[in-house]
Amino acid sequence: MIIGCGNLRRLFILIIYLLIMNFRFAQGRKAEKLIWNMMAELGFIVIPFGYEYILPQFANRNNLLKGKAGELVRGQPDFLIVNPKTNYAYFIEVKSRVNEGIDVKDIAEYPESWVILVAPGTISIAKADYVINSSREDCFQNLTEIGPFKHADLNVIMNYVRKTIAIF
């Protein structure tokens, strides 16, 4: 079979696209695992909540749930965390980024919902509704400045910040 230049170019672009998507998916899972471990070490009860955990058969971009219910399920935050001292619960959405911004279409507005951004050498946080509605790119703050981690052990957080360099 002979492949023409146009078809060969399309095939090459498809292969590059699939490699990039696979890399992003793997980075995202690593970031989620890192944050899961950090939250547990900080003493939170961590409950996997995202559709990747509750409906793994639909966590494939080629087999996504469709319709309004599907959109709702796909938009669920990654975790529900609970402070065992107060029983206060928070939704956590983890995003990992190396050289690009966050697509706000991937963030759902849930009550008490926070977005944690993991990048090389940093872990930061912002209210989900603020990320969605803000045009500012600097809406993320240090974990210990706002939200559920305001009084968290800085040594534990810094240990995980150092781990982000190895992940990315």
Image: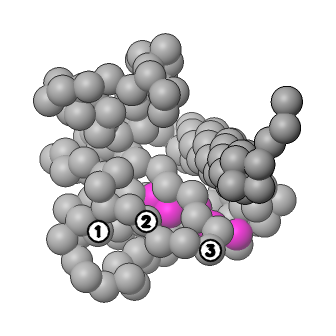
Would residue 33 be seen by someone viewing this image from the given angle? yes
Question: Label 1 vs label 2: CA separation?
Answer: 9 Å
In this picture, which residue range is highlighted in magenta? 116-120
Disc nearest the viewer among 3 and 1? 3
Residue picked out by circle 2: 102
Residue in front for this viewpoint, 99 or 39 = 99
Q: Secondary structure at mark 2?
A: loop
Contact, mark 3 vs mark 1 (Cβ under 8 Å): no
User: Which mark is drawn over residue 99?
Assistant: 3
Contact, mark 1 vs mark 2 (Cβ under 8 Å): yes
18 within the magenta span: no
Quadrant of the rendered image containing residue 127: bottom left
Residue at (38, 62) in percent of width and height: 103
Q: Secondary structure at mark 1?
A: helix
Give, as a three-letter code, the residue at label 3: Asn
Residue at (48, 33) in percent of width and height: 61
Coloration mode: one colour
Give, as a three-letter code, the residue at label 2: Ile
Residue at (49, 14) in percent of width and height: 57
Q: Please identify the dominant SS of the magenta region.
A: strand
* Residue 65 in the figure: left or right of residue 97: left
How many other residues sit within 10 Å of disc 1, few (<14), some (14-19) or many (≥20)?
Answer: many
User: Which mark is drawn over residue 54?
Assistant: none
* Residue 21 in the figure: left or right of residue 141: right
Residue picked out by circle 1: 131
Question: Label 3 vs label 1: CA separation?
Answer: 18 Å
